Structures are given as structure tokens and as C-alpha cells.
Image: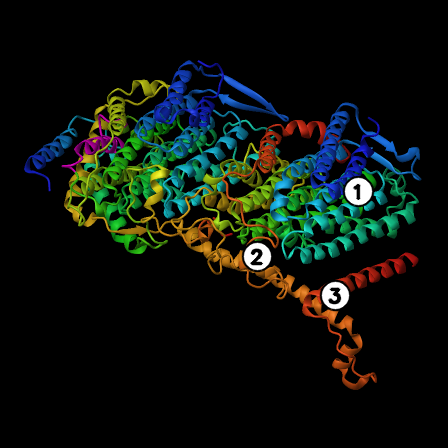
Amino acid sequence: MFGAFPPGLILILGGLLLPLVPRAFRSWAFLAPPVLVLLHLSGLEHGTQATWSFATYELIPLHVDPLAMVFGWIFALVALIAGVYALHLRDTGQQVSALLYAGSGLGAVFAGDLFTLFLFWEIMAFAAAYLVWARRTRESYGSAMRYLFVHLFGGSLLLGGVLWHLSETGSIAFTQFEATGAAWLILAGFAVNAAVVPLHAWIADAYPRGTITGSVFLSAFTTKTAVYTLARGFSGWDVLIWAGVLMAIYGVLYAILVNDIRRVLAYHIVSQVGFMVAGIGVGTALALNGATSHAYTHILYKGLLFMATGAVIYATGRSRMTELGGLFRSMPAVFWFYMVAALSISSAPFFSGFISKPMTIVAAEYADLTSVVLLLHLASVGTFLSVGLKVPYFTWFGDEPARPVKVKPLPWNIYAAMGVGAGLNILLGVWPDPLYAILPAGPVEFAPYDLPYLKKGFQLLLFTALAFFFIVARLRPKPKVQLDTDFIYRTSGGLAWNWTVLPVVRFFAWWERFSWEAAGAVARVGQDPAGWLRRRFGRLLPTPPAAGQAYPGTESAALRGSMTLMMVVLLVTLLTFMVRALF
Amino acid sequence: MNQIPVLIPAILLFTSFAAFFGGMIRLRWGYAATLLGVAASFLVSMAGVAHVIANGEIRYHLGGWAPPVGIEWVLDPLSAFMVAIVTTIGLLVVVYLPRSARFEIPGKEAFAYPSVALLLAGLTGMCLTGDVFNLYVFLEIAALAAYALLAVGDRRAPVAVFRYLVFGAVGGGFYLLGVGFLYFSAGTLNMADLAERLPELYQSRAVIAAAVLMVTGLGLKMALFPMHLWLPDVYNFAPSASAGLIAPIMTKVSAYAIIRLFLDVFHPVFLIEILPVTAFIGWLAAGGILFGSVMAMAQTDLRRMLAYSSVGQISYIALGIGLANPFGLIGGLLHMLNHALMKGVLFLIGGAIRLRTGLVEVPEFAGLGRKMPWTMASFTIAALAMVGIPPTAGFFSKYYLLLGSVDAGNWIFFAIIIVSSLLSAVYFFRVIEMIYREPEEGVISEPAVAAVPAGAMAGGGGHGDSLPPGLGGGPRHDDRRSGGARPPEEGGEAPGTMLLPILVLAVLILLVGIFNVLIVDRLLEPVVAPLSG
Amino acid sequence: MKSTVGKVVLGIALVGSLLLEFPARPAPIHVWDYPAFYALAGILGCLLLSFMAKGVMSPVLDRSEDFYGPEDAEYDWTTESPAAAGPESGGRSSPSAGSGDPGPRPRRGGA
């Protein structure tokens, strides 16, 4: 619609202009840029490019191909839905940040070169950190700063790798990488954003501490942008298969343990992204289609999950399962919306997850990666167990909490947004063809409603549920937090401070004191050398004691001492050079 | 047109006299003279830049006497670039000055105005002269003016400035000795002539000694680590406008002098290979970058933090010199411009905060984002630039330095630049986070003694620790405001004449970032051409 | 806690899913081609994961909720705007003027 204009810039400009809109209309005005982007995308053809010359480089701020378009569509869509969810919000800072965040995510997926990618990567880090910070509690301030530093660190890895890559190949084009050192560095930078274990702890730290509306946005963009970049640059790299499997299992194990309902979802993101990363690692057409479609549907159902849990938190003021329970009577609608998303994430038949995630596992089956397949199935079981069974049970059923919970009514827009999200999940689940048509790796050779897959879907879920009801008492949440890899920098931060910064500071402070005192000492000698000599060496000198002419205070002494020192230094230097010049 | 090189310092010298005498009659006349003079020099320097880009360099012989007898003045891309920086910052600070001076150094403005003009005269003279001894003359002129401007601040300023004076005198003395040796050996003081005559003499001990002395002397003036010891206290206790004027440009011009020696007096090959000065400077710079970042993290006083940060930033420029390849040197030169803009605006903002709230300690800055929105927005832009976030200016100089490190194959420098950016992020974002927080209930932003947590900040970063006992290292209660300053003038956003330069600088940071390619292409590429050969 | 109706429905669904095994299929190649694999996988997987999480990891990793510092008191989520957030500092703990303090010092891999 707008020619070769980067869609991300539409959202960014919209965000920058938003404060100019009168307050009463601002939340509605928020919806305009995503709508514009959707219209724009419908007119963009594959192969469109925009270039911009900068120094000696050709930047490519817009590069349209199937992979980018898939992500573009879902990013714009979720920005719209989350915007509806946030219609009740009155915080301009959050609204602007959300648009900047979504816009830079879009900018990153449509970037054709590494510099543009890096620019948007950095903007994403700041905008997202603000969405965490905006909750304005002491916890959130700390969490936001940690988020920012982790992502700036990842950005530095990316920048280092890009510059190294540039010096070796002379190119900044963003294409599939060869296995060079520079590429590994870039991979590390992407891995931070993708929450690859062990660089994942920021997600469990920050996502539960964001604002209610902010976390919905957060869940959609950072990790999926990283998935996109991995798909574009590193498809087929075997290391990703194992990294992905590790993430998948690690995520669900923690998800079963943690108490905060949004933290469960955060660890789940690690797990689900693990599936996508593994799919990218497998690298076959089916696997790539699987990972991409999984990313698409994941954004939809994860968004809905965050919206639903956000609604619970909004209504009750509490986010921990130990403090929730028995909400079914007071919040049934939210429960049903939540279950739609939970069934989607568990790949239940007729929901959106069913037509996407199994593709990845089937691709692994075709590639004969038996252990990978088994582990991914295990992770699927865990997914349903934690998100689909444990959380709803202890939130909406189970025992009432010790302190009775008061339920506030929810604004209509929250229901509307959840409704749209749920509807889309079900729609895609029963009619996947529109999604399949835009997948990047060619025609989709996967028919999700074949009998073997239906059987798999039903059996896996139903029998997991069966087992759950037998052990439900054991899975009761505890009011505890679990240590994760962020333990290293959260506790050792103080230690590192004491061991590195403080010694340097103290040394230089001491050095300054020492040099002043030395100068003062020289001054004292210089004032009265005879007296000093006499005091040092007793009765070696015949002269009587001089009348005390000591200058008051070290200040003047230090000044004179410095002058003396300087004169001595200069004279000695001069003498040395003259002597050497002569000889 | 031909007289541009000598016109600029001449205007400024004349201005300082006019301001001095005018100020004796009426303060306002002194200020008017200063403002007009500095503005005129700014316009001439911009014309000079345009001329150099279009037509190439200008050489002017003072009094018509040809060198080596006469003094030659040169306007080439490098000196035009430097003079533009100096006069721009000078003009903006002169606009900022009256209000700030009335608050911080009441009664002494009449001396501040001519000193500013004299300082600018000295610095521009240093940049434009084509004679090594003349450079020393202007170096000392600038230094004296700087001492005067810096010493009128806080109660503790005179002692800190005296230390600077000693260091500066030693540095100047070393440089002068070096000039002497060059004259003995080559028989001329003119830079172009020296460039012709020195190559035969590269093996002579006198020339080697001269090079070492001159670089060391200038390094002292530049606050190259570890000869930076005078800088933190001086910038800390100076009046805000003086800091805002001197921090951006003074050390840069000394660095310029080293570059001039490097490129045009001694040929690059001498300082790179025959006498590996650049390698040595490079490693000192690397240490300085890390040192500056680490020390800055431990500070709670904003000005002290900016001072240590400056040590680090100057080391970036030195790193550019040390890399001694085209990208590295472009990075160093661009960083001179960028740092001048960024540090300038940061010190000016510090002054504005002090004027409105009396605060200097970062932990007390909560709520400033709401009180002074435009000022704090400028602070945020400057902080982002200091950390090196695209598309602000700061990113691009670091980018060139990184490319230079890659070209030189020096991955340690590469890593140090990146690590130091992350460290800068720590202390700058701490401030940004604080200014946008809501102030706690009951804590109105008054300069009460801050409850700084023991251990974290107190280790040598506070006022008392770096000065020896007996020199003001005692209790800090009354030192929150400078010695003669008045109580803060409440009133929301910074006053107009102070806000304007701040905003202009912030906008320049963004513009220079986006359009840095123009600057690099037109002005800096010709400068580093000798290195590509 | 499920009602009897729920239990009956679940039972029927379980049996029904097993019935899906009956249509003929090619000889099993991989382990997952065997009959009722997924049913077993569901049960065993659930038990295995629960055991690993609650049995092995929980004792090692659990810490009290204020391990990293005092947790914030209940926060009024309905008023997500800065103006409203101001007066509610009752819950927001006092950062003590030095909160520019040991907060942001997270260095990956040590400073």
C-alpha cells in the first residue's frame, strides 16, 4: 500500500506521534498503526526491496520474502489484539514503548542487512525494558535493569560478530551463515534473545514482573524475532537441535515447579521456543515449516495465555497459585479462554497448536532422530501437565486460599481481545490452510488430521490428564522461588563489585593520598633541611636549632613540596638530556 | 578569506580585552562583547570549514614574513574541524554562562567573560598555528585562562586547580624542551619545514628525545592515563559552565596537537615504527578506558562520575591515535567531536540541576524527569550517545574505532571498547532510571545528606576520600553546594538561556550521528590520507 | 474433585482414544509406531517429569520468596498508570535513597 516502506517504521512513527493524540482517544489511536501495517502487508510482494546508502554500505531496510512475511503478519496481528486488550490503559509511556517494541520487531524481521538488524535489536531491548520497568515497583526496577543489561550484552555479541563477519567477508547481507567464528558470535547474540539455556534466565525474571498489558507484548516479540533470525541465518546447524531439546525439557521442568502463573508461562516460552530452535536445527523443509508455523501459532496462544493470566491478576491482585484457587465460580469466562489457549499449546486436536507443533516432531521422525523425538514428546507431555492441567487446576479449582480473594470486574476490552484470540486459535486449528499457504519452505507435506496424528494427540493428552489426577496432590505449588542460572549474576554482582571495582577505587584513592603526603614530606624537608638532617642524624651538624619556622598546615607545605618536586624533576631531566646530547 | 586562520584567534583576543574593559564599566557590556566576539569567531570558523571543503587549505603568513622567520597560520581540514568544535562549544557555553555564573560564582562574572574569550583564543590559536613554538605560546595562554575559570568555583577548587597547574606546567615544560631540541637539530620551528628536514634526522638522539618529550608533555595536558590525576578533582569542583566549556575542548586540543605532530611534523612512519610511540599510547589508552569506566561506576556525585567518564572517553581518542590506521584515527577524530557535544551537554545539565534543585548526588535525583522534562530528555539522549546506541553520534565513533581495531588485528582493543560500553551503560542508566522514578513520599529533593549504602559507593568515590586529610576531606554537609553559591532557585525547567544550549547540543548529537558520513567524507578522510599510503 | 459425570466422560474418551489404535498400520519401525505408545508415553511422561521436577529439582533449587530481596507487597494492578501508582507507596518498599545502588550490577560472567 505504501510502496517499499518498511512496515516496522509505521509502528515506530505511530508510537512517536502517539503522545500528540488527545488523551481521550489515545488508546484507540494505538490501534491505527497495526491496522495500517496489516493493510500495507497485504500489498507487499515477495522480492520487494528498499535500499539506503550509508557510508560505503548498502543498507537494506526492507527485504520481503516468505519467511519475513509470515512473521510480519503475526506480529502486526498480535499488536492489534494486544492493543485491544490494552484499551483501558492510561499510561502513555507504555503505549509508546509497546508500539516502538512491536515496530522494531517488525523492522528486524524485514531487515535485509545486519546493521539494520542490529539497530532494531537495540531499540527492542530498550522498549521492552521499559514495559517491565513501567510497573514501578522495586522488584520491577531491578528486573528491568537486568533485562536491559542482558540484552545489551547480547547486542554487543551481535555487533562484535557482525563487525568480525564484515571484516572477513566484506558483506553485511543477512543470509545463511557459514560456520565461521564470526557466525558463532552472531549466533550467541541471537541465542540471548531466543532464551537459549543457559542464557534464558532473563525471561523468567522479567516477564512475570512486567505490567499486565506489557507482558502480553513482551511474550510475542523478542523471542520470536530471535527465532526468525535463527531460521534465516542458521537453519540446519546441528547444535541447534540439541540446544532446542535442552530448552524444551528444561523449560517444562521449571514450569512444573514455579508458583507465579506468569512465570510458568515464561518458562514455557523457553520450552516452546526450544521446539522451534530444534526444528530450525533439523533444517529440512518440513522442519522449517513446522518451526515457522509453530512460531505463528505460538504467538497467538501465548498471547492469549498472558491475556488470561493477566486478567486473573487484574481481577484478584494476585499472581501466585498458592494464593489463588476456586475462581471458577467468579471467573468462568476467563477460564474457558485460558483453556482454549492451554489446549492449543498442548497440541490438542481442533486447536491451533495441533496443526503446527507436531510438524516439527514429525520432521524429526523423518530424519530418524529417535532420541530427539522422544524428548520432544516428553516435553509435550510436560507442556500439557504444567500449563494445561496444573495451572488451571490450582487457579480455578483446588482449595480456596487462606486469605479470601476479592474479584474485581474486568473491562470489556479484555474479554473482547481474549475472545478474538480464542476464536483465531480455534479457527486455525480446524482450518489451517491459510497459514500453510504462506509458510516459507514450500508446500506443506503434512496432513494434521490423518488418523495417526489424531490418535497421538488424543492419547497423549488424555493419559497425561489421567496420571495428573492421580498425583495432583504431589504437584501442589509451594510458596517458594527456584534458583536458575541468573543466580550467578544476581548474587555475585555484589561480590564482583567488591573484588573488582572497589579495589581499583581504593587503590587510586590511596595513591592520591600517598602522593600528597610524600609531597608534604618533601616540603617539610625542604623548608628546613638543616633541621631535618639534625633530627635524622643527631649531633652531626654543629649549628644550633633553628627557630621553628614551620608553615601552618600541610596545605602550603604540599604546594611548596610540589613546586620543589617539579623543579627537581625538570632540572634532573634537563641535565640528563644535556649530558647525553653532549656525549 | 586568506586571513581566516589568523582572524579567529585575533577576534577572540580582541574580545577578551574588550570584555575586560567593558566589564569594568558595566557588566552587561562585558558580556555583550564576549557574546559578539565569540559569535563572530563561530561564524568565521564555519566559513572556514566551508572554504576548506570547497577549496582546500589556506596558509597565512603573519606580517607577510615567510617562514622560518615568520609565523605561519594554516587552515586545513584538521584545523578547520577542531576550530569548528571549539567555537561551537564556546558559543553555546557563552549563552549558558551568565545565568549559571550568577548562581554559582556571583560577583566574579566580570572576570569570567574575558577569561572565556582568552581561553577560546588560546585553543583556536593552538589549532591554527603552523609553528611549534607558537603552539606552546597559545597552549600556555589557554592554560592560564583555564586555571582562572576553574579556580573560581567550589571552596576546594583552588587547590585542585593548583595541582592542575603543576601538572600543566610540567607538561608545557616538557613540550617546550622538545621544541627546543627540534630547533637545535633542524634549525626551524615551522611545521612544514620541520616535516621536510626531520626525516634525515630520525636517528639522532635529540630528535628522538624531542618526540618523546613533546608527546609526554601533551599527554599530560591531555590527561592520558596514568597522567590523568589532576582531572577528576578539577572537573568536580569547577563551576558548571567552566566545566562545560573546558571538559569538551581543552584536552581535545592537546590531543589534536599530538595528532598534528604525528601526521604533519614527524611523518607517521616515525611514530609508528621507528619509535613505537603509537603502540605505547594505544596500550595506555586501553588501560585508561577501563580505568575511567570502573571509577565512574563507583561515584555518586554526578560531576565526579562525568569526570572519570571523561578520562575514559579521552582514552578512546588516544586509542584512535594508538591504532594508527585510517579507521582508527577517523574514530578518534570523530570522537573528539562527539565527546565534545556529549560531555558538554552533560556538564551543562549538571549545572542546570544544581541551579534548580541544589542537588549533585545521583541517588537524590528521583523525580527530576517530571520537574525538568526537556533537560532530562537531553540527558537521556546524551547518555545513550555516551553508551554508544545507534543512531546517536556516540555509536559511530565507537564503530570506527572497532573497525580500526579489526584492521589492526587487535582483538583486545575490540573487546575493551565493547566491554567499556557496557560498563558505561551501568552508570549512565543508573542515573536515567533514577531521574524517571517517582520520588518517595516525604523525600523532597533537598540536598540532605544521602544515605549512601556503605561499601558500595563509599569506597573512595565520595568527596572526602580522594583529597588528603586537611584539604577539605572532612565532613561534607556544607559542601553540597559550592562555596559561594546561593540557595537553589526553584522553578521547574531550566532557565531559558541555559536550556537553549542544552537542547541545541542534544539535537546536534542526533544530527551528527545521522549525518556523520558527511563529516567523515568531507573533513576527516583528507586528514587521514597520509596513513593509507 | 471432578464430578462423576466428568469421570465418566474422561473414561469414555480414554477408551475411545485407544480404539483409534485398531485400524491396520504398517509394521513398526521406530518405537513410537508400537500400539498404545502414546498412551503409555502420556502416563509415564507425566510421572517421570513430576518426579524429576518435584522430587529431584525442588529440594535443590527451592528458596524462600525473599531470597533475592524483600518481595513487594500486594500491588493494585487495576491502576496501571504512573499517577495512580504514586500514593500507593505503602506496598512499594523503601529503596533507601541509595537505590541507584547495588541494583543494576548484573555482569554476565563476572565484571
Give the residues in magenta: A328-352
Q: Does residue A550 appear to the left or right of B60 in the view shown?
A: left
In the rendering, at what x and y percent does residue A296 appear? 34, 27
Q: Does residue A62 appear to the left or right of B149 in the view shown?
A: left
Residue type of the residue flagged with mark 1: Leu
How was the colour assigned to the protein in this rendering?
rainbow
Residue B281 magenta-highlighted: no
C49 in relation to A63, above or below: below
Q: Secondary structure at mark 3?
A: helix
User: Which secondary structure is most common in the magenta stretch?
Assistant: helix
Q: Secondary structure at mark 1?
A: helix
Q: Which mark is residue B479?
A: 2
Q: Which of the chains bears the disc numbered 2?
A: B
In the rendering, at what x and y percent does residue B24 appear? 75, 44
Q: Which mark is residue A561?
A: 3
In the rendering, at what x and y percent does residue B259 appear? 75, 41
Labelled pair 1, 3 in contact (Cβ < 8 Å): no
Q: Same chain for marks 1 and 2? A: yes
What residue appears at the point 77 percent right and 71 percent down from the top-left corner? A527
